[in-house]
Amino acid sequence: MEKMSVIAIALVTFLVINFLYSKVLRVYVKKEFGKKWLTIWGNKVYFWQSSIFVSSAGTFLVMYLFRMF
């Protein structure tokens, strides 16, 4: 049961970080590059790749800090 709670915490942390990062970055991209930038397939891939990378790194950091305390 303990493993399931750790997995659930990690999943929720990943989703929250991903959601917040994508909202902030989407506003920045629309402001700097315009609305059409995110309609191009290659730019979408870059956007989501960076979002997944930041979410993974943030989840790893949060889980590591939880383990320390």
Image: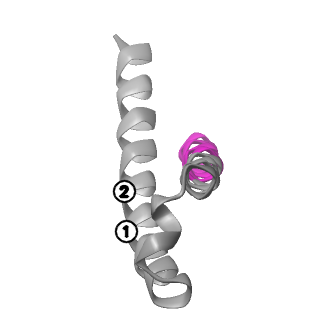
42 or 28: nearer the eye?
Answer: 42
Q: Position of residue 9 (x, y in %)?
A: 38, 36
Per the rendering, the mark at residue 15 is: none
Location of residue 29 in the rendering, given as x and y in whole percent from the top left corner: 51, 78
- Residue type, mark 1 in image: Lys
Residue 19: which numbered mark, if any? 2
Q: Magenta residues?
A: 55-69
Q: Is residue 50 left or right of residue 26?
A: right
Q: Residues within 10 Å of mark 1 (few under 14, many from 20)?
A: few
Gap between marks 1 and 2 measured at Cα: 6 Å
Q: Residue at x 35, y 24 (%)?
A: 5
How crowded pointer 2 is (Cα within 10 Å; few <14, some 14-19, many 20+) is rated as some
In the displayed structure, 14 sits above or below 18; it is above
Write the residue at 52% across / 70% down.
37
- Which residue is rendered at x = 57% and y = 46% of the image? 52
* Secondary structure found at label 2: helix
Task: Please name the residue that numbered disc 1 is placed on.
Answer: 23
Give the colour scheme of this rendering: one colour
Residue 4 vs residue 33, the one in the foreground:
33
Q: Is residue 49 magenta?
A: no
Callout 1: SS: helix
Above or below, comparing residue 8 to residue 31 in the picture:
above
Frontmost residue, 2 versus 24:
24
User: Which amino acid type is marked by label 2?
Assistant: Phe
Query: Pointers 1 and 2 in contact (CB under 8 A)?
Result: yes
Furthest residue in direction top, as rendered: 1
